[in-house]
Amino acid sequence: APPVLEISSLSVDYGVGDGAVRALHDVDLTLRRGEVLGLAGESGSGKSTLAYAVTRLLSPPGVITGGDVRYHPREGGPVDVLAMTPRELRAFRWQEISIVFQGAMNSLNPVHTVRTQLTDVLRAHRPGMSRAARTARAEELLALVGISADRLGAYPHQLSGGMRQRVMIAMALALEPEIVVMDEPTTALDVVMQRQILRQLVRLREELGFSVVFITHDISLLIEFSDRIAIMYGGRIVEQAGAADIYRDPRHPYSDGLLHSFPALRGPRRELTGIPGSPPDLRAMPPGCAFHPRCPKAFDPCDRRTPHLAPADSDTGRSVACWLNDDRRPGEA
Ligand code: ATP
Ligand code: SF4
Ligand code: MG
C-alpha cells in the first residue's frame, strides 16, 4: 500500500541549550494506507513524543529540532506537516489525523452529555450540517463503536470506563480521518475490554479504510492487532518489521527481550525472562548503542559506535539498528 505518513530523521529535544535532552533521534518511519502500525517500547522510550510531534501537538519544552513529516492525502501531492500554519493545522487535525490520548477516557467533559460532545466536533468542523443531521451522525458514530443510541443523553459518569473509551474513539472517527493515533488508549481498562475495543477498531479500519498508529506497553496486544511493529529504545527506532516476522524472529536483542517479557498468546509458553536493568536516562545516555549496558549480546563496537536503522531483509522490509545485523563493519559506517 502507498504511504500515508512519512517520517524522516525526526528529532525532538525537551528544553534548549545546556539543559536540553534528546527524546527522539533521527526517527524514520512510514505509515501505509490502511495498516495498523504498532509502536512498542518501555516507558520513556519516546512513543508519546513521536505521536505529539507528528500531529504538531508537542508543546514547550518540547521542540522539533530536525527532520521531516509528510502527509499524503488521497488526492493531491504530499503535504509538509511541519510547515503547516495554525489554520492548516486546525483543518488537518480531526479531519485527516485524530488522536486518542493516554488516559483519554477521563478527558470527556463531565458536564456535557455524550450527544453534546459528539455534535460539538461536527459543529466545529462541518458548519453546514443541520442539527438533525448532526444528531443522526452522532447516533451512527456510537453504533460504530457498539454503543446504542439511547446512551446519547448520558453524562460521562453514567458510563463505564470501556464505554467512555469507545465514545472517545467515536469522536476520533467523527470526521472520517485517514489516520487515527491511539496512544495507550486502553491501559486503564481490563484486558478483556482492551481486546474487545481493539477488535472493534480493527474491524472499523477494514470498513472505513483508515490507518492506525497504535501505542501500548503490551506487546502481546500489538502482535495480535498490528500489521507492522516498530520498537523504540532511548528515543530511537531499533527494529521495524511485520508483526508476524518480529514475533517469530526478533532480530534486535531488545525486541527479543520485550517479546520474552510477556506470556505467549498461543502455542508453547515463552519464558518470562524480561530484560534486566532499566531504561536509559536521557540525561546520561550510554555511548554507542544505548542498549549495550543491558544487552546480553553486546560485543566490541557496541559501547563505542551507534548502530543506525538499516534494512535487514530485502524481501520483508524489515530494518534493524544493531551491529549484529549490520553487514557494514562498524569502522566503515
Ligand atoms: P510511556 O510509556 O511512559 O508513556 P513514552 O514512550 O510515551 O513513555 P515519552 O512520554 O515520549 O515516552 O517520553 C520520552 C522521554 O522524554 C522521557 O525520558 C521523558 O522523561 C521525556 N519527556 C517527556 N515529556 C517531557 C517534558 N515535558 N519535559 C522534559 N522531558 C520530557
Ligand atoms: Fe546489543 Fe550491540 Fe546490538 Fe546494541 S548493537 S543491541 S549492544 S549487539
Ligand atoms: Mg507515552
Image (cartoon, grey):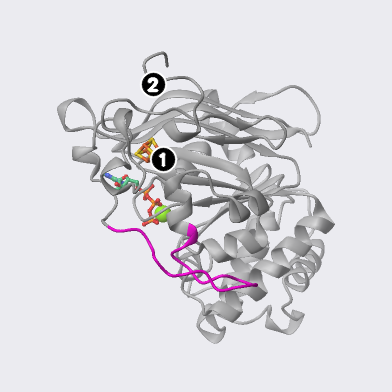
Quadrant position of ligand 3: bottom left
Q: Residue at x 80, y 68 (%)?
A: 140
Residue 72 higher or lower than 284, as above or below:
above
Residue 74 higher or lower than 39, as above or below:
above
Q: Residue at x 52, y 61 (%)?
A: 219
Tell me where residue 179 appears, x and y as whole percent.
67, 46
Marking on residue 330: 2
Q: Nearer the viewer, mark 2 or mark 1?
A: 2
Which residue position holds label 1? Answer: 58
Check residue 263 for magenta coloring.
yes
Residue 42 higher or lower than 62, as above or below:
below
Is residue 318 or residue 280 the one in the foreground? 318
Q: Which residues are magenta?
A: 259-276
Neighbourhood count class around disc 1 (C-alpha, 10 Å): few under 14, some 14–19, many 20 upward: some
Splitting the image into 4 quarters, where does residue 225 fall? bottom right
Is residue 272 or residue 30 the one in the foreground? 272
C-alpha distance separating marks 2 and 1: 35 Å
Type of amino acid at the residue the image marks with label 2: Pro
* Total labels drawn: 2
On whether ligand 2 comes within 8 Å of the CB at mark 2, the answer is no
Quadrant location of the N terminus?
top right
User: Taken as a whole, is the magenta stretch helix, strand or loop?
Assistant: loop
Type of amino acid at the residue the image marks with label 1: Leu
Check residue 215 for magenta coloring.
no
Element class at badge 1: loop
Splitting the image into 4 quarters, where does residue 206 fall? bottom right
Tell me where residue 135 appears, x and y as whole percent.
76, 68
